[in-house]
Amino acid sequence: MTSDDHSTAGIDVRDVPETDIDQALDLSYLAFHLKPSDATRKYHHDLLRACVRIGAYDGGRLVGLVAAHRLSLTVPGGQLPCVAVDFVNVAPTHRRRGALTSMMDGLWRRCADEGRPIACLWASESAIYGRFGFGIATEAYHVEVDSSRPLALRVAPDGRPLRLVDPADAPALLAPCYDAGLPHRAGRFTRDEQWWRQQVLDLEGTASNADQHGFGALRVVVLGAPGEQPGGYALYRTRGPGDGRPGTVSVEELEAESAPATAALWAYLAAIDLTSTVRGPRPADDPLLYLAADRDQVRVTSQEPCLWARLVDVRAALTARSWASPVDLVVDLTDAVLPANEGRFRLTAGPDGATWEPSTDAPDIVLDVRELAACYLGGTPLRRFVQAGLATERTPGAVRRLDAALETAWLPFTGENY
């Protein structure tokens, strides 16, 4: 970084100035095999300008990049500042020379400087990030609804009117509804108007590749009459039938304040003319899976990792989240990347808060920071890692108590891939 420049194997790692953003984009397009339009390049340029940018240089030429958005992530009981890692790449001529490790080291220092205890990312290659302490923190089901017949539901849909709105008007209309849902699920990002316009709604038409599969423009449907706060909304695209494939509704986001509101939105999506399939990523505990009167009509077609998380400052992260029940135990934590996190600590937590302090007592649980990150948002119980041999319970019942304390009412979910 500016004050922590260092080199490894002839490669200098330092901040990437704005004057090198075009060079950074060229490198990224090379690594990801992209040929963007001029408008998309400008969009990426604007994104990078607002990011943390750490580069690896060889003789003054950029050969590696790690960028990160400064965002806030919902965690159980609140929000924490985080870095959302993006544009990670190393030139094919400079792989396996320590460039990525050195750039990630620079990112950890930046997190410490800015007080951001969590890093997160979407992994293009999942084999890479475990060694940096990232664990899979949220997962998604891909749901498919057979809409060739009316969607049978066990709950009567909310009777308020449904209406289509112009996406350009959506940020102001939808933001209160989205924000109201943030406390209920961890793993989601807070949004300002620019994030809504560029990342969520793609109002400039530069970020989305949806039309490459024949899908049309983004549509926005809201539940509720004009002038009243929406009870929910859905963002979706459609593709008519053709070439032997069914007409399809692709759901990009759906938020609802209640089960009847959820039912109303899904019933609408399943009734769109000239379509016979509705699909999209949803939380593993999505109400639709329970509202459906016929589960043969609503199928889970796949399950996949979404957001990976890294606890950069374990103490800050653990003491910032809420806890479902009291727990008092000693954890022996390993962290090969950030030694400040490593050691034996007593976790004392409950509805009134938590402490994480060094301890010399015998450990109740032994685990790595990667597994702790995967459990942190409440998505995966620690017992799964114990069963897999990736964590160890030294005191019988300790894992059960910690799982109970980490539990959340709703599973974490990350619907947007920034």
Image (cartoon, helix red, strand yellow):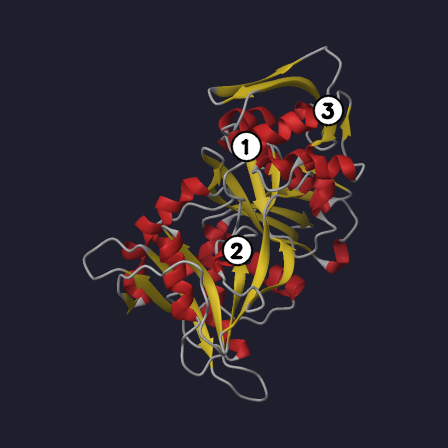
Residue 147 image offset from top left, x and y in percent: 49, 74
Q: What residue type is labelled 2?
A: Ile
Q: Is mark 1 on a helix, strand or loop?
A: loop
90 with respect to 255 (left or right):
right
Identify the disc placed on residue 365.
3
Q: Nearer the viewer, mark 2 or mark 1?
A: 1
Going from N to C along the chain, the mark reached first, 2 or 1, is: 2
Which residue appears farthest toward the left when viewing the image?
A: 227
- Camera-side residue of 251 and 307: 251
Residue 274 image offset from top left, x and y in percent: 44, 83
- Camera-side residue of 185 and 111: 185
Going from N to C along the chain, the mark reached first, 3 or 1, is: 1
Q: In which quarter of the image is residue 182?
A: top left
* Whether residue 37 can be seen here: no
Q: Nearer the viewer, mark 3 or mark 2?
A: 3
Tell me what residue is drawn at x 64 percent, y 57 percent.
303
Question: Residue tagged by mark 2?
Answer: 21
Q: What residue type is labelled 3?
A: Ile
Q: How far apart are marks 3 and 2 (CA)?
A: 45 Å
Residue 76 sits above or below residue 412 on the image? above
Q: What residue type is labelled 1?
A: Pro
Residue 413 sits above or below residue 169 on the image? above
Q: In which quarter of the image is residue 331?
A: top right
Q: Quadrant of residue 206?
A: bottom left
Residue 267 image offset from top left, x and y in percent: 40, 67
378 with respect to 92 (left or right):
left
Question: Residue tagged by mark 1?
Answer: 117
- Camera-side residue of 341 and 249: 249
- Camera-side residue of 409 and 94: 409
Q: How far apart are marks 3 and 1 (CA)?
A: 22 Å
* Whether residue 25 can be seen here: yes
**Mark 3 crowd level (few <14, some 14–19, many ≥20, 10 Å Cα):** many
